[in-house]
Image: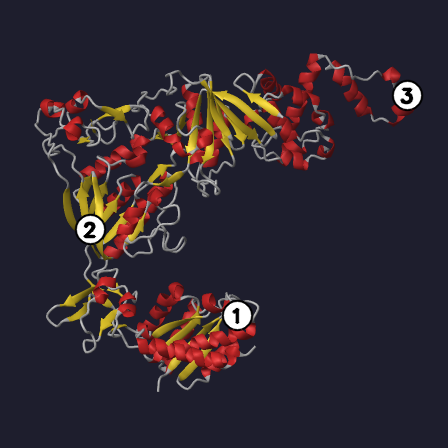
Amino acid sequence: MNRFGVFVCHCGLNIAGTVDVKAVSREIGEIEDVSHSEDYIYMCSDPGQLLIRNAVREKGLDGVVVACCSPTMHEVTFRKAVESEGLNPYVCEIANIREQCSWVHQGDKERATAKAREIIRSVLEKLRGNEVLETLAMPLTKRALVIGGGIAGITASIDLADSGYEVILVERQPSIGGRLDQLSLTFPHLDDARCILGPKKAEIANNPNIRVMPYCEVEEVKGFIGNFDVRIRRKPTYVDWDKCTACGVCLEKCPVESLSDFERGLTTRKAIYTGALSENSGKPVIDPIHCRHLVDGTCTICQEVCPEGAIRYDQGEELLEERVGAIVVATGYDLFPMEKIGEYGYGRIPDVIDGLAFERMLSPSGPTGGEIRRPSDGRIPQEVVFIQCVASRDPERYMPYCSRVCCMYTAKQAKLLKQKIPNSQPYIFFMDVRTDSKGYEEFLQGAIEEEELIYLRGRVARVFREGDRVRVWGEDTLTNRKVELDADMVVLATAVVPSEGIKDIAARLRATVDKHGFLTEAHIKLYPVESPTKGIFLAGCGQGPKDITDTVAQASATASKIQSLFSQDALLQDPLVAFVDPEICSGCGICVQVCPYEAREMDEYRGISKVHEALCQGCGACIAACPNNACELRNSKAVQVFGMMETFAEGAEGSLADG
Amino acid sequence: MKIEISRGKVHNEFSQKVEEISGQNLFACYQCGNCTAGCPVSFAMDLGPHQVIRYSLLGLEKEVLECNTFWMCASCLQCTSRCPKGLDIARIMEAIRLVILRKKERLDHLEVAELSEEFLERVPQIALISGFRKFTS
C-alpha cells in the first residue's frame, strides 16, 4: 500500500477564494492510499514547506502531491523540499488547481471545488505509476558564445573572460563597438562614447580568454544547454588580415564611393572600408556589391597599392565549428526607417535626419568633424526641431511601445546643439518626457533651464519643405494652440527596433521573439535575462529598448548566470525524458525525423531507435508520432496518462456533472 | 487658434522683462498646474497662473496682457509656497503687473471723486490702494 501525502495550498485567496480547500483536503484524506492530507495558506512559504517535510519524515510518505499553482512556478521548490527529507524528487507531483481551476472558475465555488478534487485524484493516479528516477549528469562545455559586439556583448565577454572562462565573440560588422561607437557624448554625465568604449575594446583585445570573430555570423546551432554545436560563417573580407597592417592606403586610393551606413548616409565610404571610420586601427573589408573588381573585374587599384600584398579577391567564406556551453544573444537595435514615415517626408527631405545621424554630426570623428551642419547646403542651422516618439507609442500604425532612450538623448542633443551654436533655438515636440533613471530628471531640468530649450507638448502632424526650410505643423496642447514654425533642420527620435535578421538568428537558436521581434525572456521578473530556451541568455536592446546603463547591467547579469552554470562539475538534468521499449520498436525511424532537438537516432546495429538523454527535452513529439507506442516519456507513460483521464472521467460522471 | 513660432517670438523681449523683474526663470516651469490647482481665486481667472507662465515663455504678450489673472492675484503666496520647482509665481504675477504699469497706458485707474460715498464706505482700503497703484507705480 502506498503512503501518499496531499498538501492543498490556499495561495492566499487565489485558490481558497474559489475552492473549498478544507473540504477538498478532507475528502482526499479519505482515499485509501493517502495517509496524510492537509491544507495551508501558503504552501511555498518556509512554514508551508516545513509541513511537507515533517509529514514526509514523520509519516514515512513515499509520494507527495502538492495541489497549488502551475508546476512552472513551484515544482522545483517542492521537489527540493521532499528531497531534503530523503524522498526521491520525482515522486513529488503538482496538481494545478490555480491556473487550471480557481482562476478560471471564479464565482462557481461548488463546481470549482469538485474540479479541484478531481484534478488531485487524477494526479494521485499518475503518482501511482511513477518510477523513482535519478537526475542525469551531463558533461558541460565551459566556453561561451557571445553574439553581437556592442557594449552588451563586450561587457558580457569581459565579465566571463575575467572569471576564467573562454569566450567566442561573434560580430557581423568588420569591427566590434556596435551602436555605441556611433554616439557622441552620453547622458546623463556627457561622457564621451569613445572614452567608455575605447578601454573596453582594449580589454577585449588583450584578454587571452576572448576570441573575437569579426565579420562573422552564426549559421547554425545544434545541441542544448551545456553543449551547443555552433557553426560560424566567416564572410570573405577579400583582405588577408594576417598580412594587412591597416596602413590605410587602399582606403585612400579606392575610386568607388557609396553612402556610409556607419555615418547614417551623411557621407560616403569607399568600396574597401573599415568598420568604424573612427578606428584607424581597424582592418578593412571589401564590399562585394560596390567593388568594381568583384562586380566586373575592371579595377585592381587596391591590390596594386597594397604594400603588403594583402588583397585576396578570390577569398571565399569559411565555416568554423565550435562547441559552447552557453550563448549570450546581444544583437542590438536599429532605428525605425524614416522612409516609412510619410508625414515626416519619407526620408526624402535632406534636412530631416534621425537621432543617430545627429549623433554622427555631434561626434568629433563624424563626417562634419563635430560641427552641426544642414545636410542640404552645409549651412549652420539656427532653428532645430526635435520630434520625440516618432513611430513609438503609435499602436495603430507603427510600434506601441516606448523606446525608452529618446527622451534623454533628445534633451542631450538639444543641449549640445545650444552649446555648439549659442544663438540657435531648439524646439522639442514631446508627448511625455520620461526620465526614469538615476540623475536623468536632474539632467533634463538642468538642460531646459540653462540652455533655454522650448518643449512643446504634442505630436507633429506634418513636416514638409517650404523654400529652403522645413515647415513643421504641430500642436502645443499645454496652450491648446496649433503651432507652426520654419525649421532649418528636423531631428526625428525614431523608434528603437530589433536589429535586422533577429528573427533568423532567434530561429537558429530556437529562442523566441515577440511580435516586434524583440527576444522574449523566460519571465519578466523571475528570469529577465534568460530565454525560455535553456542556455540562451539575453542582453541589450535585442531583448527590448534600453539605455547603456541598463544594457551593461543586463550584460553583467548574463555573465553572472553563465558563471554559476559553469561553476558546476556537470550539468544536472531532469530525467523526465523519452525512452524506447526495444521489444516493441520496429525501427521505422519516424521519431528521428520529428525530434526537434536531434535527440533521436537509429541504432543501426540493433535496428531500433534510441534516445540521447542529454539532448531530449521531454517534449513528447516522438511519443505522439510513434505508430507502435514504443516510445514513452518517463513518469508520463501512456498507462499513467490514460489512468488520469479515466479517473477524471469517473469524477465527471459523478459530482462534476451535477448542475 | 494658430501660433507662429520662431526664434524672435519665443522667449522674446516681453518674456525676458518678466524674468528680469521677477528674478525667475520661466523655463523652469514644467507645467504641473499645482499653482493653479491651489490658487484660491483661480476660479475667477481667465487663465490659470501656470498658463500665464506658459504664454509668457512662448512670447504670447498680447494674450497675457489681456487676461485678468494677475489682477485677480491676491499675492497670498500659496502658489509660491507649493511650487515644486521653487518658482516664485506671485513674483511673476507682480512682474506682469509692473510691465503693464510701467507702460503707463492703462486708463482704467480709479478717479476717487467719481466713486459714490456709499461705495467708498463699503470698499476695502486695500482695494483703493491697489486701484491707485495701477497708475502710479
Quadrant of residue B43 in the image? top right
Q: Earlier in the sequence, mark 1 or mark 2?
A: 1
Badge 2, how many Cα within 10 Å: few under 14, some, many 20+?
many
Question: On the rendered structure, is A315 left or right of B15?
Answer: left
Secondary structure category for the residue under label 3: loop
Secondary structure category for the residue under label 1: loop
Query: Is label 3 in contact with label 2 (beta carbons under 8 Å)?
Result: no
Quadrant of residue B98 in the image? top right
The mark tally for this picture is 3
Q: Are marks 3 and 1 on the same chain?
A: no
Identify the chain of the residue marked 2, using the numbered disc in the image: A
Give the colour scheme of this rendering.
secondary structure
Query: Is label 3 in contact with label 1 (beta carbons under 8 Å)?
Result: no
Residue at left offset 61%, top offset 23%: B56
Q: Are marks 3 and 2 on the same chain?
A: no
**Residue A230: image tag:** 2
Is A87 located above or below residue A335 in the figure?
below
Q: Amino acid at mark 3?
A: Ser
Residue at mark 1: A16
Identify the chain of the residue marked 3, using the numbered disc in the image: B
Residue at mark 3: B116
Residue at left offset 47%, top offset 30%: A343
> Is there any visible trace of residue A575 in the rendered image?
no
